[in-house]
Image (spheres, rainbow, N blue to C red):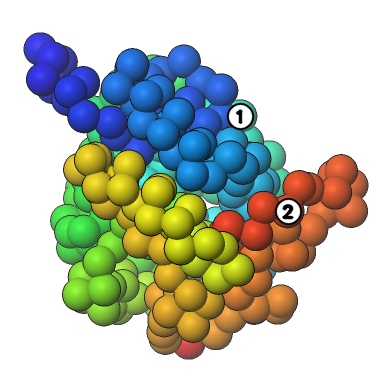
Amino acid sequence: MSDTGLDTTRPHVARMYDYYLGGKDNFEVDRAAVVAVEAAMPEVRQLAFENRAFLRRAVAYMTAAGIRQFIDIGAGLPTAGNTHEVAQALTPGARVVYVDNDPIVLSHGRALLATNVDTTVVTADLRDPADVIGRDEVRKLIDFDQPVGVLLIAMTHFLRDDERDEVMGELRKSLVPGSHLATTHVTRDRHSAEAVEGVEAVYRKTPTPIFFRTHDEIARFFDGFDLVEPGLVTVDEWRPDPADPAPEATRWLYGGVGRRL
């Protein structure tokens, strides 16, 4: 543990994700973990870029649907095409709260957003959604009497089965009808058991093990939400932007957006 509060002895998912995307805010332990993941899933870096592209399309969709405030849980380290950049380009004044449990995200995010009064960064954990929702910094920007867009991009696969209903139920009950939920989740569908186990083995060495699931298992995270078209599909199939080059299709991630019933 460093004197800044960062644990540099174990890989952390936010820093690993930063390295997947070619970032520099990571440590040797994170880079070694990524190399081990790549041995089982050679497409993992492409998967990370597919995931970011889905996030941008999902935010654009929610903005077009009238959402003016967003909570991005498990936001990770700042990179191009973040939620606030997409939302505020389309709707100036859109409010965004980033949430992550890694202190390095807080320090980098606050430096980046120092002059953006409509965006903030909070250190909190998805596993304690009541804490996330109840934070003063969150409620300063987010009006829970109005629809909210919640982003759990590449986050729900870190929840155990016995955590899912409580965590997702707590989030759901805080959202008024018309709110939206977007999530992506790794799948075992159409992939070898050896590859899945190889990746899960790496993440078991981090504070946040990962759980690959089937399409039907992932759909349960949308209980209480009405999936918008085209439903829960691989992220390359979710409302692809014709202006973008055709994405590589790793088919490791399902993604979807649901509207609160």
Q: In which quarter of the image is the N terminus?
A: top left
122 sits to left or right of 241? left
- Closer to the N terminus: mark 1 or mark 2? 1
Q: In which quarter of the image is residue 155?
A: bottom left
Numbered mark located on residue 137 in the image: none
Q: Residue at x 40, y 23 (%)?
A: 31
Return the x and y of residue 116 as percentages of the image width and height.
47, 28
Q: Nearer the viewer, residue 211 or 155?
A: 211
Return the x and y of residue 12 as percentages of the image width and height.
29, 34
Numbered mark located on residue 80 in the image: 1
Label count reads 2
Return the x and y of residue 162 as percentages of the image width and height.
20, 75
Q: Which residue is drawn at 58% across and 80% down?
A: 227
Q: In which quarter of the image is residue 79?
A: top right
Number of residues whose C-alpha sits closer than 10 Å to that of mark 2, classed few (under 14), some (14–19) or many (20 or more): some
Residue at the top extreme?
3
To which residue does mark 2 refer?
249
Q: Nearer the viewer, residue 21 or 93?
A: 21
Return the x and y of residue 223 as percentages of the image width and height.
41, 84
| Residue 120 in view of the camera | no
Q: Are marks 1 and 2 in contact (CB under 8 Å)?
A: no
- Measured Cα–Cα span from mark 1 to mark 2: 21 Å
Q: What residue type is labelled 1?
A: Ala
Number of residues whose C-alpha sits closer than 10 Å to that of mark 1, classed few (under 14), some (14–19) or many (20 or more): few
Q: Residue at x 25, y 66 (%)?
A: 160
> Which marked residue is nearer to the observer: mark 1 or mark 2?
2
| Residue 144 in view of the camera | yes
Residue 238 against residue 227 in the figure, above or below: above
